[in-house]
Amino acid sequence: MTIGELLKENRKKLNLTQKEMAGTIVSTSFYSRVEQDNTRISAIDLLKILKVHHINISDFIDQLTIKLNNQTDEDEIIDTLFIAFFNNDIDTVMQLKKYIYLRASQTTKLYIKLIEALLKQDRTILNKQDEDLIRKELFNGLNWSIPTLKLFTNSMFIYTSDELSFLLTSILNKYQTTKNETVQKFIASICINFLDLCYKRKNFTFWKKGISFLFSLPSTPELLMYKLLGKYYQAILEKDKTTIDHIKTTLMLSGFSNYIELLPNI
């Protein structure tokens, strides 16, 4: 089954309308298009919907039909990988690796290895050839697009701090004023990863770039999580334990206990 079909099936089991299922996470019209498989929902928004309605995430992923016939199917696999990543679910990643790795495209294989490396916190999973392929994709004229932004979001840890600052600057120069919510979410994810890597490397020189973009995002339900994480990293920099604890409590009450474990602390 597709993501849309599974959402519709679970909604009917819960006896909810599309408006009730979408809640404040996405608009009803957008959710309706997702159910009809006419548009794709981000991994973060899908996770929010599953969590708020107490739908078992692992069971949901298990019911997804994974095929490898065209680009749409490849996109579905990548979406599943993102869901697993945001839920800190290494088991799902390893299942995908086991069943579809040999038949997958080079790009999908890179995604699998990248997310496995991230969740296991083991950079050695990526060999030199993998890293070179990622760099080749991203440094090809700095022609940023949705696919290259996706790849960059999950491969930032292979770059030096100077490279990251250069690439982030080029991205912000192109998309700083974008009104496209999908692009805003990708750039926000990049900024959050940038802040996390800078913290781990104790290099805070360019933090303001990432935080400023997150704070400039519109105050909409769809972008709430990104703005909240921007506030979290600002609190980390300022060693504001009270704000850190408040945000952690908010995330825990929202069903993101697993994600809290990935965040830095003071």
Image (cartoon, rainbow, N blue to C red):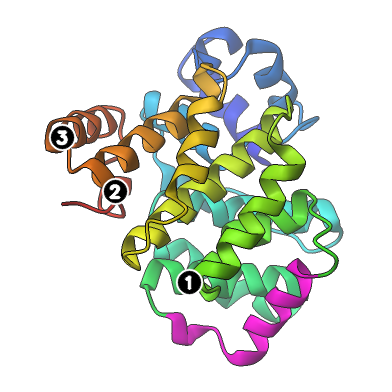
Which residue lies at the image location 37% right of the left edge and 73% below the top edge?
A: 121
- The tag earlier along the polypeptide, 1 or 2, is 1
- The tag earlier along the polypeptide, 3 or 2, is 3
- Calculate the distance from the C-alpha at mark 1 to the C-alpha at mark 3: 29 Å
Q: Position of residue 233 (x, y in %)?
A: 33, 43
The kind of residue on which mark 2 rests is Asn
Q: Residue 41: which numbered mark, if any? A: none
Q: Quadrant where the N terminus lies?
A: top right
- The tag earlier along the polypeptide, 1 or 3, is 1
Q: Position of residue 54 (x, y in %)?
A: 36, 29
Whether 125 is among the magenta residues is yes
- Calculate the distance from the C-alpha at mark 1 to the C-alpha at mark 2: 16 Å
Residue bearing mark 2 = 258
Could you say whether the residue bearing mark 1 is in a helix, strand or loop? helix
Q: Residue 245: which numbered mark, if any? A: 3
The 10 Å Cα crowd at callout 1, few under 14, some 14 to 19, many 20 or more, is many
Magenta stretch prevailing secondary structure: helix
Residue bearing mark 1 = 116
Q: Is residue 14 left or right of residue 252?
A: right
- Whether residue 213 is situated above or below residue 18 in the rendered picture: below
Examine the image and state in which quarter residue 264 appears. Answer: bottom left
The span shown in magenta is 123-139
Q: Position of residue 53 (x, y in %)?
A: 40, 24
